[in-house]
Image: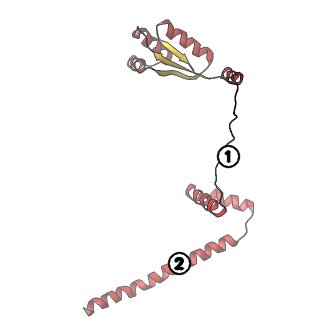
Amino acid sequence: MTEKKTVKSEKEVKEAPKKEAKKKVKEEAPKKEAKKIEKIISKDEFVAAIEKMNILELAELTKTLEDKFGVKASVPVAPLAQGVSGKEKASEEEEKTSFDVILVEVGEKKIPVIKEIRTITNLGLKESKDFVESAPKPIKEKIEKKEAEEIKKKLEAVGAKVEIK
């Protein structure tokens, strides 16, 4: 039994300097950080230091500043205007420059609709068929009003129901 104790004590003797070194490093680290903090730097030096940081370090810095000063780093949101009249809503819709053409319903004649979808979207036959069968679905998005109306006319001529939004 005493032999085991001596073995343990030998291990402890070997590990003791390591433990002391670790403790010393842990104790010195805050002192070094405090020395860094105490140094006054210019704005340019501060910006340069931030430029050298990676994303994780920047996130840590943000969190530290939020905790230190009791603030939240968020973008301010402007309050929405309340009480928009009908005339203002109508003028907003008129100013719209991009439109979405949506195939709402295929109608009775599916094959002519598939052919038109092929010409409009440049899809293959199988893709056009799948597209038509998955209606309601946007055909084209963010296009000019003139083009949207042309597409609507073509598809309605072959029996499909189309909306422009």
Q: Give the crowd class for mark 1: few <14, some 14-19, many >=20 residues within 10 Å.
A: few
- Residue farthest along the bottom direction in this orientation: 2
Left or right, residue 32 beside residue 112: right
Residue 124's spot in the image, x, y percent? 41, 18
Left or right, residue 11 beside residue 41: left
Q: Residue at x 32, y 87 (%)?
A: 8
Check disc 1 and report the residue beneath it.
76
Residue 99's spot in the image, x, y percent? 59, 21
Residue 111's spot in the image, x, y percent? 40, 10
Applied colour scheme: secondary structure
Instruction: Identify whether 81 is placed above or below 21.
Output: above
Residue 105's spot in the image, x, y percent? 45, 15
Left or right, residue 116 beside residue 99: left
Instruction: Say what amino acid the circle numbered 2 marks.
Output: Val
* Quadrant, the C terminus: top right
Left or right, residue 51 beside residue 115: right
Instruction: Say what amino acid the circle numbered 1 marks.
Output: Pro
* Quadrant, the N terminus: bottom left
Q: Secondary structure at mark 2?
A: helix
- Residue farthest along the top direction in this orientation: 157
Q: Residue at x 40, y 11 (%)?
A: 110
Task: Decide which of tag 1 and tag 2 comes sooner along the chain.
Answer: 2
Q: Residue at x 69, y 72 (%)?
A: 38
Q: Secondary structure at mark 1?
A: loop
The answer for how far apart the CA atoms under marks 1 and 2 are is 43 Å
- Residue farthest along the left direction in this orientation: 1
C-beta proximity under 8 Å, tags 1 and 2: no
Instruction: Identify whether 39 is placed above or below 57.
Output: below
Query: On residue 25, which mark appears?
Result: 2
